[in-house]
Amino acid sequence: MKLKDKVAIVTGGAQGLGEGIVNCLAKEGAHIAIIDINGKNARKVAGEVQSLGRKALAIEADVTDNNKVVKAVQETLDFFGKLDILVNNAGGYPSGYLEADPGMRIVDRTEEEWDGNYKLNLKTAILMCQAVIPHMVKQKSGKIINIASVGAQLPANLLVCYTTTKAGVVYYTKALARDLAPDNINVNCVLPGVIYTPLWERLATVYIKQRPKAKEMTPHEYFVNSVVPRVPMGREQTPEDIGHAVVFFASDEAKNITGQDLAVDGGMAFV
C-alpha cells in the first residue's frame, strides 16, 4: 500500500468528490480525519473507512471559520498523534449564486457573490494550510493537495466568481509550494473535470430551468446529454479518478513533484 499508516485530513469529505477521495486514500492504507459541515454524512463515511481496517475520525466543522479550523486540526492531532497529508477539497457554490440571471455581465456580479465564493473555495484552503503547516514544518515532511476545478482554465460568465476563486487556488498552490520546499513539504493541485456530484446536480437543476428544451430532463439526463459530450474523451470523470490523483501526489512516488496542477478532465482544458 502506498500510504500505509499515513494520517490524512480531507475537508468536505462527507459526500461526492470528497467521499471518493477518502475511499481511495483509505484503500491505500491511510487513516483519515473527515472534516465536513455535514456531521451525519461525515460519520457515515468514517464508518466506511473503518470497514477497510483503517482508523477514522469524523469532525463536524465549518472550515470557513478559523476558530473551528484550528480546533478541528488539534482534534485530529490529539486522536492520531500526527498528520502527514492535507486534502483541501471543501468548496462549492454559495446559496443563491447559481440562481442569478444567466445573462448577467461579470461587472454586475455582487459583492456578496464574490465574498461567498472566496470564503468557500479559497479561504477554506488558506485557513486549513495555516493551521496545518506549522506541524508539518516541525516534522520536516508533509503533503498538501488542493482541489481546484477545470473551470479555473475555462472562462464562463455564469460561474465567474467560482472559477476565479478556483484559479486563485491554483496560484496559491504554486506560491505555497515554493515557500515550503525547503521544509520538505510538497504542495500540488488537482483540477477535476465533469463529475456528477450533489453539487453538479444542483447546477444541472438550474440549467434546466433556464433552457426550455431541457425542461423534460432529469438533472442527470441533462448532465449526460449536455455536459459529457463536451469532454473530448467522451466520458465523465468519477470521484475515484480524482482520488487516484490525490493518492499519487500524497505518495512517495511524487516526492520530487511540487507546485503542479493536474487536470483530470478527459481533455476539456485543451478544447
Image (cartoon, rainbow, N blue to C red):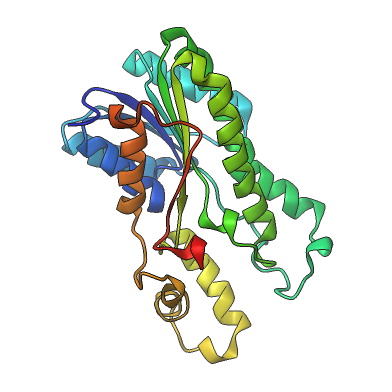
Q: Would residue 63 be seen by someone viewing this image from the given angle?
A: no
Which image quarter: residue 13?
top left
Residue 31 lies, in percent from the top left, at 28, 28
Depth check: give the residue in front, 181 or 58. Answer: 181
Residue extending furthest toward the right? 107
Q: In this view, does 122 lie to the left or right of 81?
A: right
Residue 35 lies, in percent from the top left, at 44, 35
Q: Residue at x 48, y 25 (%)?
A: 72
Residue extending furthest toward the top? 138
Q: Which residue is drawn at 46% across and 44% down?
A: 38
Depth check: give the residue in front, 255 or 90. Answer: 255
How many tags in the picture? Answer: 0
Residue 149 lies, in percent from the top left, at 52, 53
Note whether 237 is above or below 2 in the view shown: below
Q: In this view, does 251 lie to the left or right of 137?
A: left
Q: Which residue is drawn at 45% across and 59% down?
A: 193
